[in-house]
Image (cartoon, rainbow, N blue to C red):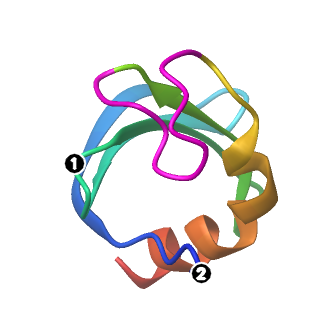
Amino acid sequence: MAFNPKITDMQVSDINDKTQLYQYVVTLQDKSKYRLFLSKNPEWNLQAANRLLNIPCPMCRKDYYCKCMDKHLDKLEAEFLSK
């Protein structure tokens, strides 16, 4: 089964205009939450994504921090840019 992230909610968490770094907390379709670290210089670029521990990981089902989302940063960045 392929992982296709769909963002349903997006909130700004932190903005640093001096360094052009931004943090967003997004909620995906499966109710999992992630903190996205982005830079804008001049285009948006997703640096990292950390899963917030509200539900187990949708890919490996672990209930602690994992690196599963690192494999899907390009999909998550494309979904972010479409919003």
Q: Whole-percent x and y of residue 74?
A: 73, 71
Q: In which quarter of the image is residue 46?
A: bottom right
Residue 72, by quadrant, is bottom right
Q: Does the magenta stretch include residue 58?
A: yes
Is any part of residue 42 visible from this angle?
Answer: no
The dot on residue 49 is: none
Give the main secondary structure, helix, strand or loop, of the magenta stretch.
loop
* Circle on res. 2: 2
Give the CA distance from mark 2 to mark 1: 17 Å
Label located before the other in sequence (2 or 1): 2
Screen quadrant of the N terminus: bottom right
**Disc 2 crowd, CA 10 A, few/some/many (<14, 14-19, 20+):** few
Where residue 80 sits in the image (x, y, percent)?
47, 68
Label 1 Cα crowd, 10 Å radius (few <14 / some 14-19 / many 20+): some
Q: Is residue 65 left or right of residue 68?
A: left
Q: Residue at x 33, y 46 (%)?
A: 26
> From what the image shows, is residue 24 above or below residue 78?
above
Instruction: Find residue 11 and report its horizontal and vertical position in percent.
Output: 25, 42
Give the magenta-colored segment's residue range. 54-64
Corner quadrant of residue 54: top left
Where the C terminus falls, by quadrant?
Answer: bottom left
